[in-house]
Amino acid sequence: MDFLSGSSIMALLTMVLIFTVGMAVMQAGQKITVGDRLKKIAAQKKKEAGEEEEIAEAYAGFRDLTEEKSALAELLESILGMVGVDMVQEQEIIGMKFAQSGISSPSAPIYYVFLKKFGGLLSLPFILFPLLSEATGLIKGLSVLVTMFVLLGGFFGVDLYLKNKKDKRQKILTRSFPDALDLILVCVEAGLALDAALSRVCKELDRAHPEICKELNKTRMELTLLNDRQRALQNLAARTDLLPFKALVGALLQSERFGTSLTETLRVLSEDYRNTRLMIAENKANRLPALITIPLMLLMMPAFVLVLMGPAIINLMHVLSTHKTH
């Protein structure tokens, strides 16, 4: 009986010890879990803050979307309204021109419409300068020539300016497109979705190719905000008005609509436009001898002729002078 009592006491003590050790282990495990959770929450907060900074940095180029009209633009808009010009309708007509030119200021369309309507009239008073001027000869001719340029600028200046801006921007986008496409291909092959791939491309090429990064950032923002992804991609093709971007948009739309391999399509496009860029460079190199022929003839040939004929001319002048003295 005493033995049984001793055994029962030992068993009871053993159970209490096991229960105490188990509770201590559970308590220790719970403390570790809470600590890990706190660390995880802190890391998550830090990550979210970093993502917010990254998003703010990515959308820093779109601050002009919230830019307000200047005081002068508001004054000109009121003048246009008084003469019956509807700026809302005008902006719908010319909005794509400014998008293709890379101009997003809200004041720019007002300046454009005002100069388009009244630029010619504002330049007409310059005709009085050559008429009232007492200058003659070359000065008179120059004043007339300047007046003609002012008149042409008043009537056609804004359209020429927009066309020049569009052409320059398209050249920049065409030159930077192969690099952006190669990087998009690398990101897609790495398993990134289209939105994440565009974000990575804009982050990597922001310094080297800021113009194309601005366009891709706009597309990424529209993909996030618009319900119609097809419309967002088509806007990219419309804003650039370039065949390479239209081909890229067509490939992306085909991939999303029919489920085709986006990687293979992008690889074909990337190789094609890389070869196109090489062909353009070779074409420029082949045109170089023809382009430098005229400068060589106009600038270097007289120097060569002078070097070759100089001694003979000097000797001839010396002989002639000696002959006269005799």
Image (spheres, rainbow, N blue to C red):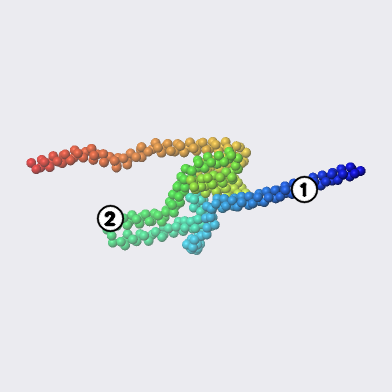
Viewer-nearest of discs 2 and 1: 1
**x, y percent for residue 71:** 49, 63
Query: Picture quarter containing residue 313?
Result: top left
Query: Picture quarter containing residue 193?
Result: top right
**Which residue is pictured at 28% across the width and 60% down the height?**
135
Residue position marked by numbered label 1 in the rendering: 23
Is residue 210 left or right of 144 when viewed as pictured?
A: right
Residue position marked by numbered label 2 in the rendering: 138
**Which residue is pictured at 47% across the width and 56% down the height?**
112
Residue 155 visible in the picture = yes
**Which residue is pictured at 45% across the width and 50% down the height?**
165
Is residue 242 left or right of 315 when viewed as pictured?
A: right
Q: Amino acid at mark 2?
A: Leu
Q: Which quadrant of the figure contains the N terminus?
A: top right
Residue 238 visible in the picture = no
Q: Amino acid at mark 1?
A: Met
Look at the numbered disc 1 and give the secondary structure of its residue.
helix
Q: Residues within 10 Å of mark 1 (few under 14, many from 20)?
A: few
Q: Nearer the viewer, residue 84 or 318?
A: 318
Look at the numbered disc 2 and give the secondary structure of its residue.
helix
Q: Residue furthest left?
A: 326
| Total numbered badges shown on the rendered structure | 2
**Which residue is pictured at 14% across the width and 41% down the height?**
318
Label 2 – label 1 distance at C-alpha: 107 Å
Is residue 74 left or right of 135 when viewed as pictured?
A: right
**x, y percent for residue 203:** 54, 47
| Labels 2 and 1: the sequence-earlier one | 1
Q: Residue furthest front?
A: 2
